[in-house]
Image (cartoon, grey):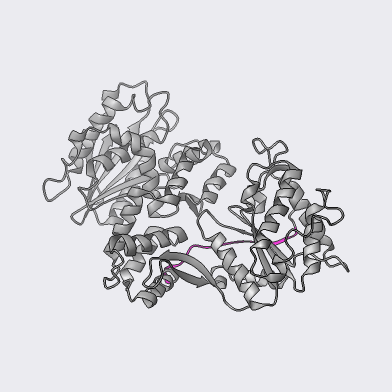
């Protein structure tokens, strides 16, 4: 199969209102060719806004243009909420007819809505099999069929769908019995993670292994820095506008190759910040400004994704991630909850360390969760810490100690305070008091890393902070203290700083709040570390 293209992002171009820039299909997923040539059925899954639908459109166009086989993509979005088996199967066939009507292949288009009179079409236990068998018998070439948004099919409808596909797959090589040569279920998850339930209420468990006919489970990876460069250079070829090498690297840093963000950064840089003036190069600084704008305005996809944080299952996982699972009862988090957040694309898993998928998501997640807390921080704390050539981080944390003592109970203690509250309040306080006054506020947090780091950078100097909690059952012992000092020192060394702050929140609410406020300054391996008790 020859290489075709995938539409990946669009920027206002020099000739038309929207200019599309592309990558070859097989570069995004090389095994697709093998799946179709080998007559395999397979899964294609990736997080939201990874370009799955765009990929399928391009793949369908590619196969149809080459002429060896036919291809059809059918979205199952209309199946949302249709748990009834009869309704689900009927809706699938209606959707197939709809997408056949829109096919660029004349022989597929002509077959739409011609199968309702076929004998047996009134039996929903075989209706879909009969429909697809009849379609394939009438075509003069084999058909590759792709079901997009397959996650929308759940409950008994999912089981009925899988059963009919599996049964017809098993007999498709018998004389007179034709069926799609290759089929893909495309969505957020692998089929093993699809949940079904007979009454359509809360899922109770996985369906029987009715799609054991699948050959493989594929995914669409994020773009590499090299691929981002290829995409951006297509804009240069079309308009003459240059993306400097540093801009490409910063786009990779902020997005980590997430396709929607790669597009959004380019669009924001070219259309919004440079006003489509193609004589101006896109620099690293422009991409940084584009990222900050996306973080502040949270357009479209970002806003809808962040709304997921209100879901109890998602919030439970994010609480653990933000707390670094330090002292967190990890057994309360199910594998299904974690998988849900991975499927959404909010988190990534690197060696069992779960952290935000990219720096933009990392920043937006904290801002979303601390929005109300940030409003509680008094305005008279803002802008007081950067009057001289250095950042008065010591003064800031002493002010925070007082703020925490006065407000901790209102912020959730003792009965409503969670492991996450101190970390979120700290982030809110730092955000409110320093944002716009320092060069950068960096947050590093992850489930499985056992620590949470904050870092403010001012006039080229880094001011690193590590956050810890101590509560009954998880006391901040001398051993934990030594390990925490070593962790902070390692982070300081990485950031080139000789001074750091280790902030420990005592969550034993039987103690007097004033007794928890302590300050100790020590020398550790030639560096200065302030131990701040809250």
Please provide percent x and percent y for residue 329.
50, 35
Please provide percent x and percent y for residue 389.
12, 51
Please provide percent x and percent y for residue 502.
29, 41
Instruction: Give the quarter of the image for residue 321.
Output: top left
Which is nearer the eye, 360 or 332? 360
Quarter of the picture holding the C terminus = top left
Image height of 447 relative to 418, above or below: below
Left or right: where 174 falls relative to 298:
right
Residue found at x 64% / y 78% = 66
Left or right: where 286 falls relative to 95:
left
Image height of 428 relative to 239, above or below: above
Please give the count of numbered marks on the rendered protein. 0
Task: Give the residues in magenta.
Answer: 213-226
Which is nearer the eye, 39 or 119? 119
Residue found at x 31% / y 53% = 292
Residue found at x 71% / y 35% = 199
Which is nearer the eye, 279 or 223? 279
Left or right: where 71 falls relative to 3:
right
| Magenta span includes 365 | no
* Residue 30 seen anywhere in this rendered image of the structure: yes
Left or right: where 499 falls relative to 6:
left
Image height of 462 relative to 403, above or below: below
Image height of 39 relative to 340, above or below: below
Quarter of the picture holding the N terminus = bottom right
| Residue found at the very far left of the displayed protein | 388
Please provide percent x and percent y for residue 275.
29, 63
* Residue 479 seen anywhere in this rendered image of the structure: no
């Amino acid at each position: 199969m020859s290489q075709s293209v995938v539409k990946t992002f669009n920027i206002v171009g020099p000739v038309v209102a929207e200019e599309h820039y592309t990558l070859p299909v097989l570069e995004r997923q090389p095994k697709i060719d093998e799946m179709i040539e080998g007559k395999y059925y397979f899964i294609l899954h990736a997080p939201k806004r990874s370009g799955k639908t765009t990929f399928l459109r391009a793949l369908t166009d590619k196969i149809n243009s080459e002429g060896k086989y036919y291809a059809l993509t059918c979205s199952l979005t209309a199946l949302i909420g249709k748990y009834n088996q009869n309704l689900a199967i009927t809706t699938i066939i209606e959707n197939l007819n709809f997408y056949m009507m829109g096919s660029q292949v004349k022989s597929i288009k002509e077959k739409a809505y011609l199968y309702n009179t076929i004998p047996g079409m009134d039996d929903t236990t075989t209706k879909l099999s009969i429909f697809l068998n009849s379609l394939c018998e009438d075509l003069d070439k084999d058909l590759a069929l792709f079901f997009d948004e397959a996650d929308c099919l759940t409950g008994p409808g999912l089981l009925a769908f899988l059963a009919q596909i599996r049964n017809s797959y098993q007999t498709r090589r018998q004389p007179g019995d034709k069926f799609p040569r290759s089929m893909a279920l495309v969505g957020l998850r692998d089929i093993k993670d699809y949940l079904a339930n007979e009454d359509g209420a809360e899922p109770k468990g996985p369906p029987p292994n009715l799609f054991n006919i699948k050959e493989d489970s594929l995914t669409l990876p994020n773009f590499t820095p090299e691929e981002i460069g290829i995409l951006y250079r297509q804009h240069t070829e079309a308009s003459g506008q240059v993306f400097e090498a540093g801009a490409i690297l910063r786009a990779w840093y902020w997005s980590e190759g997430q396709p929607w963000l790669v597009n959004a950064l380019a669009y924001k840089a070219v259309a919004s910040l440079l006003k489509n003036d193609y004589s101006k190069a896109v620099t690293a600084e422009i991409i940084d400004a584009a990222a900050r704008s996306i973080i502040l305005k949270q357009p479209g996809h970002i806003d809808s994704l962040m709304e997921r944080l209100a879901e109890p299952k998602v919030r439970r996982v994010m609480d653990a991630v933000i707390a670094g699972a330090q002292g967190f009862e990890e057994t309360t988090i199910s594998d299904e909850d974690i998988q849900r957040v991975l499927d959404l694309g909010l988190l990534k898993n690197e060696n069992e360390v779960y952290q935000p998928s990219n720096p933009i998501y990392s920043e937006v997640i904290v801002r979303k969760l601390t929005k109300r807390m940030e409003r509680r921080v008094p305005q008279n704390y803002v802008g007081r810490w950067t009057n001289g050539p250095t950042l008065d981080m010591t003064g800031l944390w002493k002010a925070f100690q007082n703020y925490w003592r006065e407000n901790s109970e209102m912020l959730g203690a003792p009965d409503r305070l969670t492991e996450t509250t101190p970390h979120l309040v700290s982030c809110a306080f730092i955000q409110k008091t320093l944002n716009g006054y320092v060069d950068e506020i960096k947050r590093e947090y992850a489930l499985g890393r056992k620590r949470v780091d904050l870092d403010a950078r001012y006039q080229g100097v880094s001011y690193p902070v590590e956050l810890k909690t101590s509560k009954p059952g998880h006391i901040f012992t001398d051993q934990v203290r030594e390990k925490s000092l070593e962790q902070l020192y390692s982070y300081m060394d990485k950031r080139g700083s000789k001074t750091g702050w280790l902030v420990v929140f005592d969550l034993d609410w039987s103690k007097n709040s004033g007794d928890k406020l302590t300050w100790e300054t020590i020398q550790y391996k030639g560096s200065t570390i302030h131990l701040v008790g809250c």
